Structures are given as C-alpha cells and as structure tokens.
Image (cartoon, grey):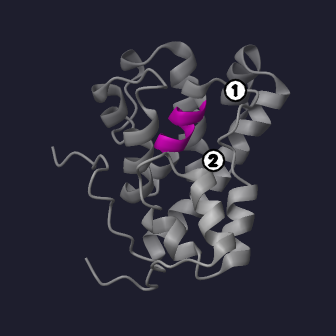
Amino acid sequence: MADLRISPTNPPYDPAIAEAFSRIMPPGFEPLTLFRTMARSPRVLQRMFAGSLLDKGAITFRDRELMILRTCARCGAEYEWGVHVTFFAEKAELTEQQAAATVSPLADDSWNPRDRLVLQMADELHDSAAISDALWSELKEVFSDEQLLELIALAGYYRTISCIVNTCRLVPEPYAARFSKA
C-alpha cells in the first residue's frame, strides 16, 4: 500500500481537539488514526463528530451496524469496517461469521429477513445511489419512514467516511478486524 497522503496529528493536541477525542474514544484507547488525520482540519473534525449517527436513533443497533459494515465493505474501506467490527459487532449481536459475511456477496439464506433487507438496501444504495421500487415496497413493510431516512443517511455518511479513509490511505488500526483473505 502507498504511503499515507495526510499525516495524522500527534500529541500534544490542541485543547479543543483533545477534549473532542476524550468524548468520542473509549477509555484506554488512543484516538483513531482517522480522527487524528481529520484533526488536520479541526472544523471538518468537529462537523464529522457533530454529524455522527452513532447515538440512539430510530433503528436498532444491529440495523445500524449492518448498514455501516455493508457500506464500508462495498466501498473497500477495510479501516472503518475493522473499527466497527472490533468495537460494535458484539454489541450488535453479530457473530464473527456474520461480520465477515458483510464483505461477501449476499446469500439470502444466511440472514434473517430484516437483516437481508438492510444489506440489500446498502447494496442498492452503493450500486445506484437509489432504491428500486421492489425493494422499497419490502422495506416499507418493515421500517418506518423515520427508520428508512436514518438508514439512507447512514449509508451516505459511511460512504463519505469510506472515501476519506481510502483516499488518505489509512492503515487499519493494529487491534482492528481485517477483511478475510479467504
């Protein structure tokens, strides 16, 4: 892999940046390379944190993580996919095999119907930036308008994050999950 295109900031951090890092990172973890890279533009970092959809929303935690993992996987964003698998897959009640399967072509029999809809939604948004009428009809039977808008926003937000981590050529965190080489 080629060298990083934008070097992450290193401590000591500006007090406002240090405070933002302490709010977002779990205890005992250094700020992610993504966050330290984005700190090169404090305004964009603050907007990124403010625009985050990782709070309690209208969708389940599992729905959220499936949309994020599938979007990052489809974008080839191993960095962000690995961070989410490492920090959130267990809480989302995703098995190791299920997390790994978010990188593979969708096999309808390997997911429950709700999971399958979220993954199909991520795929269609990735492929066409839209959702077909057929899938939309299925989604409307399961999800509210509020939930659908949140899922669409997540797909767009994590496509943007994927563009950042891929373009800046961020190397996966040493403790983060990796795409399977199988």
Question: For this view, does 53 lie left or right of residue 169?
Answer: right
Q: What distance separates the C-alpha of mark 2 from that of mark 1? A: 13 Å
Which residue position holds label 1? 59
State the residue position of label 2. 155
Q: Are the residues tagged 2 and 1 within 8 Å (C-beta)?
A: no
- Give the amino acid type for the residue marked by disc 2 in the picture: Ala
Residue at screen point 49% across, 46% down: 26
Q: Secondary structure at mark 1?
A: loop
In the figure, 80 relative to 112: above or below?
Answer: below
Residue 71 pos. (x, y %):
52, 47
Q: Quadrant of residue 78?
A: bottom left
- Which corner quadrant of the image does residue 4 belong to? bottom left
Residue at 59%, 76% in the rendered image = 39
Instruction: For residue 76, say whether it is visible.
Output: no
Does residue 65 show up magenta in the picture?
Answer: yes
Q: Nearer the viewer, residue 160 or 9?
A: 9
Above or below, 22 relative to 35: above
What span is in magenta? 64-70
Residue 5's spot in the image, x, y percent? Answer: 42, 86
